[in-house]
């Protein structure tokens, strides 16, 4: 089962992926961002919101081959669904 790390506000290593899951109406939606170094803007892809499963799959396909963690930012009272994988604190 895939494992992810809970995102806490603060610095994360450049190149890290963050899946942000939030509420849009009565649905949970998400997007993926890649953290840039201090001299560049973060990359957000794609530009539109996605279903949680699609956002997580997208992050997996963009994960560096070194196995860097994927961070998950749950906002607006979104609760992690264990069918998406294991979320570490």
Image: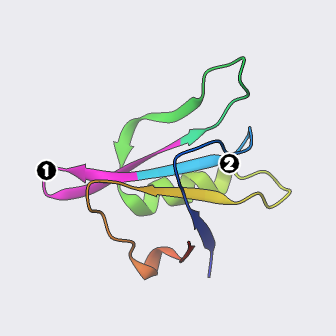
Above or below, 1 against 61 in this view is below
Q: Dividing the picture into quarters, in which one does residue 49 lie?
A: top left
Above or below, 56 against 32 in this view is below
- Quick one: label 1 or label 2, which is nearer the N terminus? 1
Q: Can residue 46 be found in the magenta stretch?
A: no
Q: Position of residue 88 (x, y in %)?
A: 58, 74
Above or below, 6 against 2 in this view is above
Q: Main secondary structure of the magenta part?
A: strand
Q: How is the image coloured?
A: rainbow
**Which residue is labeled 1 in the image?**
25
Query: Which residues lie in the magenta part?
Result: 21-32
The residue at the point 13 percent across, 57 percent down is 26
The residue at the point 78 percent across, 51 percent down is 64
Q: Position of residue 41 (x, y in %)?
A: 61, 21
Q: Nearer the viewer, residue 78 or 30?
A: 78
Above or below, 13 against 82 in this view is above
Give the number of the mark in front: 1 or 2.
Answer: 1
Disc 1 from disc 2: Cα separation = 28 Å
Number of residue marks? 2
Which of the numbered marks, if any, corresponds to residue 64? none
Q: Position of residue 60 (x, y in %)?
A: 64, 58
**Which residue is labeled 2 in the image?**
62
């Amino acid at each position: 089962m895939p494992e992810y790390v809970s995102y806490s506000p603060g610095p994360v290593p450049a190149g890290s992926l963050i899946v942000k899951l939030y509420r849009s109406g009565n649905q949970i939606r998400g997007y993926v961002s890649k953290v840039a170094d201090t001299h560049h803007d973060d990359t957000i892809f794609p530009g539109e919101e996605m279903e949680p499963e699609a956002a997580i799959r997208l992050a997996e396909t963009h994960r560096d081959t070194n196995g860097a963690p994927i961070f998950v930012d749950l906002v607006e009272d979104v609760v992690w669904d264990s069918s998406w994988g294991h979320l570490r604190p």
